Image: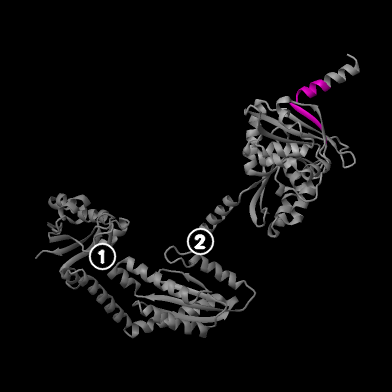
């Protein structure tokens, strides 16, 4: 075949692959059709400028809406000129357009520029090609990726080149460049990377480090940084670099992705902070815990110096409150003390370092200032019938362990005075009065008498739905049963029955551990009275009645054990 015929055959084959083909002056927008499709051309015969042609396609809704935003960019001369004169030889946009019949059709729009294309020789070829099924699937995938990714580049770090698969306007540096290293650096130099993340970004995009990694491994590498958004502000983005599926380890060709991960990253940061808080804080009071206290002690000891003031606090009467009023009352007291300390020392570090022990550390306040504030703390707590023993000391940061010890010793002296002056007795009487008032309000004198009569072997408030207990009087042996039963009243009472109740009474006693039976038996306000004999032949009487406090999801009952004369 002669060369002329071969050239004509190749040209014809290439042209046949396009629906439309035009030679375009990208400076002026004038164009000449090399091939046109009458169905696509019919409504645009009067248009002489390629950019006007693109605008009309989009504005008259020939382009499906989800692709119009990307397509309309090509109606802007500056956009097209910037990319072509910036060195891009082939630019592709895939979209779905309507035919005159209204039918949708997948097409590929491309700009093909010769190597010498420039403002002095501004001619390029604009082509429109029908998309096949494979390309359609690829387009759908690319559309999905375009929602996720800001930038997808095919890069070669040895040749220092790149091919744009996708790049938002916000990802393109102002100065156009044909080198990937320049692009990545210019992007950051223009303020698109948060200043606090610049070192991380620069280190990650170092070509030598990237090539060194992929010479050893094909594993993806990732970096997170804050990226400037259009309109200002920063959002977290993630850059991933990995080799293409068809490349070998050690190759210089790589794929670079950038995607928005702001919500995901912020949720991760919140989760990390929650884990840190759970590790560093006391679950009940939300003050810093003993672990954090010891870590801070060591940090202060190793610091550059200065004075530190320590306040050591011990709560008076926690044991008595737990025994007489229940653990919930004890927890309420601890939370009240914790909140009061935090309110009066809002800028200091406050810790719960033990069951009823608290510590405050301050590099701002001296010992005299702390003691003045403590007087207000005491007055506030006394309004809730709570009292504390305190000790304060100041010293050099390097000797913080000695200062903490001095503050603890001062607290011990204060607590000794508390007991010496009989304040503990008065506190116990106050709690007894509070308990008496509580029981009187329930209008059941028998409950209160059980506290002061040796006749009673045990008095408990039991929520039979929640299987929880708050006791008024409890013998030591039953405390241990509760502990062994993880404070489940019904499990503990079953242990009691197996160990102490004679066999012939066991079945009847066990029926009392069925919540449904108890509720049905007391539905009319009737009390349950069950007499039984213990294995030591001591006769007992158990009275179970509904508490006036029942309601709002609670089914509280009162259990009174007495020895039967």
Furthest residue in direction front, as rendered: 46
- Where 47 sits versus 322, above or below? above
How many marks the image carries: the answer is: 2
Q: Mark 1 points at which residue?
A: 471
As for residue 218 lying within the magenta part, the answer is no
Residue 202 in percent (x, y) is at 74, 53
**Image point (53%, 59%), residue name:** 276
Q: Quadrant of the C terminus?
A: bottom left
**Image point (80%, 47%), residue name:** 176
Mark number, residue 270:
none
Q: In front of the other: label 2 or label 1?
A: 2
At label 1, counting other C-alpha atoms closer than 10 Å, the crowd grade (few under 14, some 14-19, many 20 or more) is many
On the question of residue 215 being in view, the answer is no
At label 2, counting other C-alpha atoms closer than 10 Å, the crowd grade (few under 14, some 14-19, many 20 or more) is some
Please identify the quarter of the rendering in which residue 133 is found.
Answer: top right
Q: Is residue 244 found left or right of 121 in the rendered image?
A: left
Disc with the residue nearer the chain's start (2 vs 1): 2
Which region of the structure is painted magenta?
Answer: 11-24
Residue 486 in percent (x, y) is at 32, 56
């Amino acid at each position: 075949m002669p060369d002329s015929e071969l050239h004509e055959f190749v040209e014809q084959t290439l042209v046949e692959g396009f629906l439309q083909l035009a030679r375009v002056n990208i400076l002026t927008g004038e164009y000449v059709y090399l091939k046109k499709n009458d169905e696509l051309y019919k409504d645009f015969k009067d248009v002489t400028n390629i950019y006007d042609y693109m605008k009309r396609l989009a504005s008259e809704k020939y382009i499906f809406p989800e692709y119009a935003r990307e397509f309309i960019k090509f109606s802007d001369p500056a956009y097209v000129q910037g990319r072509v004169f910036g060195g891009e030889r082939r630019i592709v946009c895939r979209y779905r357009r309507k035919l005159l019949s209204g039918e949708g059709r997948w097409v590929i729009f491309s700009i093909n520029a010769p190597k010498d294309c420039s403002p002095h020789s501004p001619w390029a070829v604009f082509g429109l090609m029908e998309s096949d099924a494979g390309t359609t699937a690829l387009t759908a995938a690319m559309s999905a990726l375009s929602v996720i990714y800001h930038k997808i580049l095919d890069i070669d770090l040895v040749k220092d080149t790149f091919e744009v698969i996708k790049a938002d306007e916000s990802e393109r540096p102002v100065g156009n460049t044909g080198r990937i290293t320049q692009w990545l650096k210019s992007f950051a130099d223009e303020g698109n990377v948060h200043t606090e993340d610049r070192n991380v970004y620069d280190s990650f995009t170092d070509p030598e480090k990237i090539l060194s990694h992929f010479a050893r491994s094909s594993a993806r590498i990732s970096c997170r940084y804050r990226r400037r958004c259009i309109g200002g502000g920063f959002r977290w983005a993630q850059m991933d670099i990995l080799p293409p599926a068809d490349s070998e380890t050690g190759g210089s060709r790589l794929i670079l992705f950038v995607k928005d991960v702001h919500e995901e990253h912020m949720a991760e940061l919140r989760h990390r902070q929650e884990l840190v808080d759970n590790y560093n804080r006391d679950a009940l009071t939300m003050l810093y815990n003993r672990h954090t206290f010891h870590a801070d002690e060591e940090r202060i000891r190793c610091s550059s110096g200065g004075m530190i003031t320590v306040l050591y606090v011990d709560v008076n009467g926690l044991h008595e409150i737990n025994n007489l009023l229940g653990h919930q009352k004890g927890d309420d007291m601890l939370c009240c003390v914790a909140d009061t300390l935090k309110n009066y020392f809002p800028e200091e570090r406050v810790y719960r370092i033990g069951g009823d022990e608290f510590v405050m550390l301050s590099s701002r306040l001296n010992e005299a200032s702390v003691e003045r504030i403590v007087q207000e703390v005491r007055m506030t707590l006394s309004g809730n019938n709570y009292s504390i023993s305190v000790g304060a000391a100041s010293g050099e940061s390097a000797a913080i362990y000695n200062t903490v010890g001095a503050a603890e010793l001062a607290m011990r002296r204060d607590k000794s005075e508390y007991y010496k002056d009989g304040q503990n007795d008065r506190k116990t009487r106050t709690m007894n009065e509070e308990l008496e008032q509580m029981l009187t309000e329930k209008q059941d004198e028998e409950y209160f008498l059980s506290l002061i009569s040796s006749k009673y072997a045990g008095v408990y408030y039991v929520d039979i739905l929640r299987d929880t207990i708050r006791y008024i009087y409890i013998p030591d042996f039953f405390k241990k049963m509760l502990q062994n039963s993880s404070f489940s009243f019904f499990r503990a009472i079953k242990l009691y029955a197996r160990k102490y109740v004679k066999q012939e009474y066991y079945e009847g006693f066990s029926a009392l551990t069925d919540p449904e039976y108890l509720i049905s038996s007391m539905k009319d306000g009737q009390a349950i009275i069950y007499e039984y004999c213990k294995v030591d032949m001591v006769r007992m009487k158990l009275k179970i009645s509904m508490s006036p406090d029942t309601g709002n999801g609670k089914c509280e009952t009162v259990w009174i054990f007495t020895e039967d004369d």
